[in-house]
């Protein structure tokens, strides 16, 4: 297929750049399904702190760099056992998700797998409907929380976990 690029793995880095622990780069927040939407002036340090504390207990939330909540977002999906992070930018043309190398050999099976196949899929669902494969989720919840905080503070992807990049 012309224009299709093979997904590229972005390895994790040992050294995390320092950042301002009080900065807030995100401009819009939406909980899924309907637990609240926050615009830029409602995004407070207390709200950020609460979100970060909530993650290990289970959360599905969208964190936007776009004040209108239409583009450039990180989807955070966690059930306490798995956490999956997906960044969608450039109107969905640019997509990054957390990557779990332990499940690299399942990549070719994802398209034809039965969603109930727990050797390939987590119990997480993106947007309440699309099952998330294990290759796109990690079990190190603490690292996942750090990745979410890094995105909130910097608007960038956390270099302390592996990502896979797909673009159209």
Image (cartoon, helix red, strand yellow):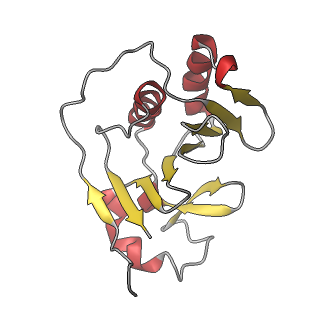
Quadrant (top left/top right/bottom left/bottom right) for the N terminus? bottom left
Q: What residue sits 50% from the left and 55% below the top?
A: 90
Residue placed farthest to the bottom in the image? 1
| Front residue of this view, candidates 73 and 126 | 73
x and y, in percent, of residue 31 in the image? 71, 37
Figure label count = 0
Q: What residue sits 49% from the left and 68% below the top?
A: 120
Vertical comparison of 129 with 65: above or below:
below
Q: Going by the image, does 104 lie left or right of 23?
A: left
Quadrant (top left/top right/bottom left/bottom right) for the C terminus? bottom left
x and y, in percent, of residue 50 in the image? 62, 19
| Front residue of this view, candidates 158 and 5 | 5
* Quarter holding residue 117: bottom right
Vertical comparison of 42 with 68: above or below:
above
Q: Going by the image, does 167 lie left or right of 17?
A: right
* Quarter holding residue 125: bottom right
Q: Going by the image, does 73 lie left or right of 100?
A: right
x and y, in percent, of residue 94 in the image? 45, 59
Residue placed farthest to the right in the image? 34
x and y, in percent, of residue 68 in the image? 67, 39
Q: Going by the image, does 84 lie left or right of 21?
A: right
* Quarter holding residue 49: top right
Q: What residue sits 81% from the left and 39% below the top?
A: 34
Q: What residue sits 54% from the left and 65% below the top?
A: 118
């Amino acid at each position: 297929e012309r224009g299709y690029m093979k997904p590229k793995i972005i390895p994790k880095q040992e050294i995390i750049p320092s950042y301002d622990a009080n900065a807030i780069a995100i401009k819009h927040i939406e909980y899924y399904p309907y637990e609240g939407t926050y615009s830029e002036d409602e995004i407070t340090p207390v709200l950020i702190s609460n979100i970060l504390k909530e993650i290990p207990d289970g959360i599905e939330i969208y964190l936007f760099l776009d004040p209108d909540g239409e583009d450039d977002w990180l989807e955070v999906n966690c059930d306490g056992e798995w956490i999956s992070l997906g960044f969608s930018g450039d109107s969905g043309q640019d997509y990054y998700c957390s990557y779990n190398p332990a499940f690299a050999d399942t990549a070719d099976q994802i398209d034809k797998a039965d969603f109930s196949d727990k050797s390939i899929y987590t119990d997480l669902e993106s947007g309440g409907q699309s099952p998330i494969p294990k290759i796109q989720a990690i079990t190190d919840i603490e690292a996942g929380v750090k990745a979410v905080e890094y995105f909130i503070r910097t608007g960038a992807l956390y270099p302390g976990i592996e990502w896979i990049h797909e673009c159209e």
